Image (spheres, rainbow, N blue to C red):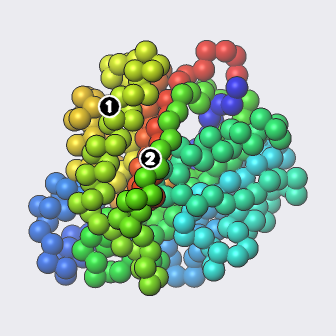
Amino acid sequence: MIHLGTIGTAIAPDSMDVRAAAERLGVDPVFVDDKLGTRNLPRLASGMGTADLASAAVRDALSRWAGDPRQIRVLVVCTQSPHGEGLPHTAAIVQQQTGLGLDVAAFDISLGCSGYVYGLAVVEGMLRSTGGHGVLVTADPYSRMIDPDDRDTALLFGDAATATILGSDGEWCLGARRFATDGAGASALERRGGRFRMAGRQVFNFAATRVPEQVISLLREEGLGVGDIDLWALHQGSKFIVETIAQRLGAPADRVPVLLDRTGNTVSSSIPLILREHLDRADLQRILISGFGVGLSWASMLLERCQEPA
Protein backbone atom coordinates (compact mmCIF):
# COMPACT_ATOMS: atom_id res chain seq x y z
CA MET A 1 0.00 0.00 0.00
CA ILE A 2 1.21 3.50 -0.84
CA HIS A 3 1.51 5.85 2.11
CA LEU A 4 1.53 9.63 2.28
CA GLY A 5 4.50 10.97 4.20
CA THR A 6 6.41 14.21 4.55
CA ILE A 7 5.08 17.45 3.02
CA GLY A 8 7.39 20.31 2.16
CA THR A 9 6.23 23.83 1.36
CA ALA A 10 7.52 27.02 -0.22
CA ILE A 11 5.70 30.34 0.01
CA ALA A 12 6.70 32.98 -2.53
CA PRO A 13 8.88 35.63 -0.84
CA ASP A 14 7.11 38.82 -1.92
CA SER A 15 3.57 39.76 -0.95
CA MET A 16 0.64 41.97 -1.92
CA ASP A 17 -1.49 43.79 0.64
CA VAL A 18 -5.08 42.85 -0.22
CA ARG A 19 -6.67 45.77 1.62
CA ALA A 20 -4.57 48.30 -0.24
CA ALA A 21 -5.34 46.62 -3.56
CA ALA A 22 -9.05 46.45 -2.72
CA GLU A 23 -9.11 50.17 -1.98
CA ARG A 24 -7.44 50.88 -5.32
CA LEU A 25 -10.01 48.72 -7.13
CA GLY A 26 -12.97 50.14 -5.22
CA VAL A 27 -13.84 46.80 -3.60
CA ASP A 28 -15.67 46.89 -0.25
CA PRO A 29 -13.32 45.64 2.51
CA VAL A 30 -16.28 43.84 4.11
CA PHE A 31 -16.59 41.76 0.94
CA VAL A 32 -12.89 40.93 1.10
CA ASP A 33 -13.11 39.85 4.74
CA ASP A 34 -16.40 37.94 4.58
CA LYS A 35 -16.34 36.43 1.10
CA LEU A 36 -12.72 36.16 -0.01
CA GLY A 37 -10.99 35.89 3.37
CA THR A 38 -7.64 37.08 2.01
CA ARG A 39 -5.21 39.56 3.60
CA ASN A 40 -1.76 39.09 2.12
CA LEU A 41 -1.04 37.29 -1.13
CA PRO A 42 2.43 35.81 -1.64
CA ARG A 43 3.99 36.80 -4.95
CA LEU A 44 6.94 35.40 -6.92
CA ALA A 45 10.00 37.60 -6.75
CA SER A 46 11.36 39.15 -9.92
CA GLY A 47 13.40 36.60 -11.85
CA MET A 48 11.86 33.66 -10.00
CA GLY A 49 10.02 30.99 -11.98
CA THR A 50 7.71 28.07 -11.28
CA ALA A 51 10.56 25.55 -11.10
CA ASP A 52 12.41 27.68 -8.54
CA LEU A 53 9.38 27.70 -6.25
CA ALA A 54 8.75 24.00 -6.83
CA SER A 55 12.37 23.09 -6.13
CA ALA A 56 12.30 25.02 -2.85
CA ALA A 57 9.32 22.91 -1.76
CA VAL A 58 11.09 19.68 -2.75
CA ARG A 59 14.21 20.67 -0.83
CA ASP A 60 12.06 21.47 2.22
CA ALA A 61 10.38 18.05 2.02
CA LEU A 62 13.68 16.21 1.64
CA SER A 63 15.15 18.08 4.62
CA ARG A 64 12.26 16.86 6.78
CA TRP A 65 12.25 13.31 5.46
CA ALA A 66 14.24 10.52 7.11
CA GLY A 67 14.65 8.63 3.84
CA ASP A 68 17.38 8.62 1.21
CA PRO A 69 16.80 10.92 -1.80
CA ARG A 70 18.29 8.16 -3.96
CA GLN A 71 15.08 6.22 -3.28
CA ILE A 72 13.04 8.77 -5.27
CA ARG A 73 11.87 7.14 -8.50
CA VAL A 74 8.98 9.41 -9.53
CA LEU A 75 8.67 13.19 -9.67
CA VAL A 76 5.34 14.64 -10.82
CA VAL A 77 4.77 18.39 -11.03
CA CYS A 78 1.16 19.54 -11.14
CA THR A 79 1.00 22.96 -12.78
CA GLN A 80 -0.85 25.02 -15.36
CA SER A 81 1.78 27.77 -15.03
CA PRO A 82 4.89 25.93 -16.26
CA HIS A 83 8.41 27.27 -15.97
CA GLY A 84 9.52 29.62 -18.74
CA GLU A 85 7.64 28.87 -21.93
CA GLY A 86 6.66 25.37 -20.85
CA LEU A 87 9.32 23.48 -22.80
CA PRO A 88 11.20 21.70 -21.37
CA HIS A 89 8.70 20.46 -18.82
CA THR A 90 8.97 21.90 -15.33
CA ALA A 91 9.63 18.53 -13.68
CA ALA A 92 12.86 18.11 -15.64
CA ILE A 93 14.13 21.46 -14.35
CA VAL A 94 13.13 20.57 -10.79
CA GLN A 95 14.95 17.24 -11.06
CA GLN A 96 18.14 19.07 -12.05
CA GLN A 97 17.79 21.83 -9.45
CA THR A 98 17.19 19.41 -6.58
CA GLY A 99 19.91 16.92 -7.50
CA LEU A 100 17.64 13.91 -7.83
CA GLY A 101 19.08 10.92 -9.67
CA LEU A 102 18.86 10.12 -13.36
CA ASP A 103 16.65 7.09 -12.68
CA VAL A 104 13.68 9.31 -11.91
CA ALA A 105 10.52 9.42 -14.02
CA ALA A 106 9.87 13.17 -14.08
CA PHE A 107 6.87 14.70 -15.84
CA ASP A 108 4.17 17.36 -15.52
CA ILE A 109 0.41 17.04 -15.30
CA SER A 110 -1.86 19.95 -16.22
CA LEU A 111 -4.60 20.34 -13.63
CA GLY A 112 -5.79 23.22 -11.49
CA CYS A 113 -7.43 23.18 -8.09
CA SER A 114 -8.33 19.47 -8.21
CA GLY A 115 -4.75 18.60 -9.10
CA TYR A 116 -3.51 17.45 -5.71
CA VAL A 117 -6.10 14.68 -5.47
CA TYR A 118 -5.52 13.60 -9.06
CA GLY A 119 -1.77 13.82 -8.56
CA LEU A 120 -1.79 11.53 -5.54
CA ALA A 121 -3.50 8.85 -7.63
CA VAL A 122 -1.02 9.37 -10.51
CA VAL A 123 2.04 8.98 -8.26
CA GLU A 124 0.44 6.02 -6.50
CA GLY A 125 -0.05 4.28 -9.83
CA MET A 126 3.50 5.00 -10.97
CA LEU A 127 5.02 3.68 -7.74
CA ARG A 128 3.24 0.36 -8.16
CA SER A 129 5.46 -0.25 -11.19
CA THR A 130 8.67 1.59 -10.26
CA GLY A 131 8.90 0.88 -6.55
CA GLY A 132 10.78 3.28 -4.27
CA HIS A 133 9.35 6.66 -3.38
CA GLY A 134 7.72 9.45 -5.33
CA VAL A 135 7.28 13.18 -4.96
CA LEU A 136 4.12 15.04 -5.94
CA VAL A 137 4.81 18.74 -6.46
CA THR A 138 2.12 21.39 -6.75
CA ALA A 139 3.21 24.78 -8.10
CA ASP A 140 0.85 27.16 -9.86
CA PRO A 141 1.92 30.80 -9.41
CA TYR A 142 -1.08 32.47 -11.01
CA SER A 143 0.26 35.98 -10.32
CA ARG A 144 2.13 35.93 -13.64
CA MET A 145 -1.14 35.72 -15.58
CA ILE A 146 -3.50 37.73 -13.37
CA ASP A 147 -4.63 41.19 -14.45
CA PRO A 148 -3.97 43.45 -11.43
CA ASP A 149 -7.10 45.42 -12.36
CA ASP A 150 -9.40 42.38 -12.50
CA ARG A 151 -11.61 42.53 -9.41
CA ASP A 152 -12.56 38.84 -9.78
CA THR A 153 -9.01 37.48 -9.48
CA ALA A 154 -6.52 40.13 -8.33
CA LEU A 155 -7.52 39.89 -4.65
CA LEU A 156 -7.73 36.11 -4.42
CA PHE A 157 -4.75 34.14 -5.74
CA GLY A 158 -1.39 33.62 -4.03
CA ASP A 159 1.84 31.91 -5.10
CA ALA A 160 3.04 28.82 -3.25
CA ALA A 161 4.33 25.31 -3.89
CA THR A 162 4.27 22.03 -2.00
CA ALA A 163 6.05 18.68 -2.29
CA THR A 164 4.54 15.48 -0.88
CA ILE A 165 6.66 12.36 -0.50
CA LEU A 166 4.85 9.06 -1.03
CA GLY A 167 6.06 5.50 -0.63
CA SER A 168 5.82 2.37 1.48
CA ASP A 169 6.32 4.28 4.74
CA GLY A 170 4.35 7.06 6.41
CA GLU A 171 1.40 7.22 8.78
CA TRP A 172 -1.34 8.00 6.26
CA CYS A 173 -2.79 5.67 3.63
CA LEU A 174 -4.55 6.77 0.46
CA GLY A 175 -8.14 5.58 0.59
CA ALA A 176 -11.26 5.65 -1.56
CA ARG A 177 -11.48 8.41 -4.12
CA ARG A 178 -13.78 9.88 -6.76
CA PHE A 179 -12.97 11.98 -9.86
CA ALA A 180 -15.24 14.01 -12.14
CA THR A 181 -15.08 16.46 -15.05
CA ASP A 182 -17.61 18.71 -16.77
CA GLY A 183 -15.91 20.27 -19.78
CA ALA A 184 -19.13 22.04 -20.73
CA GLY A 185 -18.32 24.55 -17.99
CA ALA A 186 -14.64 24.94 -18.88
CA SER A 187 -14.97 28.57 -19.96
CA ALA A 188 -15.73 29.59 -16.36
CA LEU A 189 -12.00 29.38 -15.61
CA GLU A 190 -9.66 29.96 -18.50
CA ARG A 191 -6.64 31.79 -19.82
CA ARG A 192 -7.36 34.20 -22.67
CA GLY A 193 -4.85 36.53 -24.25
CA GLY A 194 -2.30 35.60 -21.61
CA ARG A 195 -4.63 36.56 -18.74
CA PHE A 196 -6.56 34.36 -16.34
CA ARG A 197 -10.32 34.92 -16.31
CA MET A 198 -12.87 33.57 -13.84
CA ALA A 199 -16.67 33.68 -13.85
CA GLY A 200 -17.03 33.84 -10.07
CA ARG A 201 -20.75 33.18 -9.75
CA GLN A 202 -20.63 30.18 -12.09
CA VAL A 203 -17.66 28.71 -10.24
CA PHE A 204 -19.38 29.19 -6.89
CA ASN A 205 -22.57 27.49 -8.06
CA PHE A 206 -20.57 24.57 -9.46
CA ALA A 207 -18.51 24.07 -6.30
CA ALA A 208 -21.42 24.49 -3.91
CA THR A 209 -23.45 21.85 -5.77
CA ARG A 210 -21.07 19.28 -7.24
CA VAL A 211 -18.58 18.97 -4.39
CA PRO A 212 -21.09 18.12 -1.61
CA GLU A 213 -22.82 15.65 -3.96
CA GLN A 214 -19.55 13.85 -4.68
CA VAL A 215 -18.40 13.80 -1.07
CA ILE A 216 -21.68 12.49 0.30
CA SER A 217 -21.76 9.78 -2.37
CA LEU A 218 -18.19 8.75 -1.50
CA LEU A 219 -18.95 8.57 2.21
CA ARG A 220 -22.12 6.56 1.70
CA GLU A 221 -20.38 4.02 -0.50
CA GLU A 222 -17.71 3.62 2.19
CA GLY A 223 -20.31 3.25 4.95
CA LEU A 224 -19.25 6.50 6.59
CA GLY A 225 -21.05 9.57 7.85
CA VAL A 226 -20.00 13.19 8.22
CA GLY A 227 -19.19 12.58 11.87
CA ASP A 228 -16.57 9.99 10.89
CA ILE A 229 -14.34 12.66 9.32
CA ASP A 230 -11.91 14.29 11.74
CA LEU A 231 -10.64 16.93 9.32
CA TRP A 232 -12.01 18.37 6.08
CA ALA A 233 -9.19 19.67 3.87
CA LEU A 234 -11.18 21.53 1.22
CA HIS A 235 -9.59 23.49 -1.60
CA GLN A 236 -9.39 27.11 -0.51
CA GLY A 237 -11.35 28.59 -3.41
CA SER A 238 -12.54 31.44 -1.21
CA LYS A 239 -13.71 31.75 2.38
CA PHE A 240 -17.33 31.83 1.25
CA ILE A 241 -16.99 28.73 -0.93
CA VAL A 242 -15.29 26.73 1.84
CA GLU A 243 -17.90 27.76 4.41
CA THR A 244 -20.79 27.05 2.04
CA ILE A 245 -19.54 23.55 1.17
CA ALA A 246 -18.97 22.81 4.86
CA GLN A 247 -22.50 23.94 5.72
CA ARG A 248 -24.06 21.85 2.97
CA LEU A 249 -22.11 18.83 4.15
CA GLY A 250 -23.01 19.48 7.77
CA ALA A 251 -19.32 19.48 8.68
CA PRO A 252 -18.46 21.18 12.01
CA ALA A 253 -16.72 24.50 11.42
CA ASP A 254 -13.88 23.60 13.80
CA ARG A 255 -12.98 20.65 11.56
CA VAL A 256 -12.79 22.74 8.37
CA PRO A 257 -9.61 24.88 8.28
CA VAL A 258 -9.62 28.17 6.37
CA LEU A 259 -6.11 29.46 5.54
CA LEU A 260 -6.90 32.11 2.95
CA ASP A 261 -5.83 35.00 5.16
CA ARG A 262 -2.23 33.76 4.99
CA THR A 263 -1.78 32.55 1.43
CA GLY A 264 -4.94 33.22 -0.58
CA ASN A 265 -6.07 30.66 -3.16
CA THR A 266 -2.92 28.74 -4.08
CA VAL A 267 -4.66 26.48 -6.62
CA SER A 268 -3.41 22.86 -6.32
CA SER A 269 -1.26 23.74 -3.30
CA SER A 270 -4.10 24.70 -0.96
CA ILE A 271 -4.93 21.16 0.25
CA PRO A 272 -1.34 20.07 1.03
CA LEU A 273 -0.76 23.40 2.83
CA ILE A 274 -3.61 22.43 5.15
CA LEU A 275 -2.28 18.89 5.55
CA ARG A 276 1.19 20.16 6.41
CA GLU A 277 -0.28 21.91 9.45
CA HIS A 278 -2.46 19.03 10.69
CA LEU A 279 -1.08 15.60 9.74
CA ASP A 280 0.96 15.30 12.95
CA ARG A 281 -2.10 15.67 15.17
CA ALA A 282 -2.57 12.51 17.22
CA ASP A 283 -6.35 12.98 17.39
CA LEU A 284 -6.86 12.57 13.63
CA GLN A 285 -7.76 9.18 12.18
CA ARG A 286 -9.57 10.05 8.96
CA ILE A 287 -9.31 13.09 6.64
CA LEU A 288 -11.40 14.01 3.63
CA ILE A 289 -9.64 16.04 0.95
CA SER A 290 -11.51 17.63 -1.95
CA GLY A 291 -10.31 19.86 -4.78
CA PHE A 292 -12.38 21.60 -7.44
CA GLY A 293 -11.96 24.18 -10.17
CA VAL A 294 -10.41 24.47 -13.64
CA GLY A 295 -11.95 22.08 -16.11
CA LEU A 296 -14.48 22.07 -14.58
CA SER A 297 -12.89 19.31 -12.54
CA TRP A 298 -13.43 18.00 -9.03
CA ALA A 299 -12.01 15.13 -6.98
CA SER A 300 -12.26 13.83 -3.43
CA MET A 301 -10.25 11.25 -1.47
CA LEU A 302 -10.14 9.73 1.98
CA LEU A 303 -6.86 9.67 3.90
CA GLU A 304 -6.80 7.19 6.76
CA ARG A 305 -4.21 6.56 9.42
CA CYS A 306 -2.52 3.33 8.42
CA GLN A 307 -3.20 0.34 10.61
CA GLU A 308 -0.51 -1.99 9.32
CA PRO A 309 3.14 -1.37 10.26
CA ALA A 310 4.75 1.24 7.95
306 in relation to 131, above or below: above
The kind of secondary structure element at disc 2 is strand
Percent x, y of residue 112:
49, 58
Q: Nearer the viewer, residue 139 or 183?
A: 183
Residue at left offset 40%, top offset 74%: 196
Percent x, y of residue 91:
70, 62
Label annotation for residue 255 = 1
Inspect the image, locate mark 2, and give the three-letter code of the amino acid beneath it.
Trp
Inspect the image, locate mark 1, and give the three-letter code of the amino acid beneath it.
Arg
User: Which quadrant, please, contains the C terminus?
Assistant: top right
The kind of secondary structure element at disc 1 is helix
Label annotation for residue 298 = 2
Q: Is residue 276 left or right of residue 196?
A: right
Q: Nearer the viewer, residue 118 or 157?
A: 118
Eye-nearest disc, 1 or 2: 2
Are the residues flagged by discs 1 and 2 in contact, CB closer than 8 Å? no
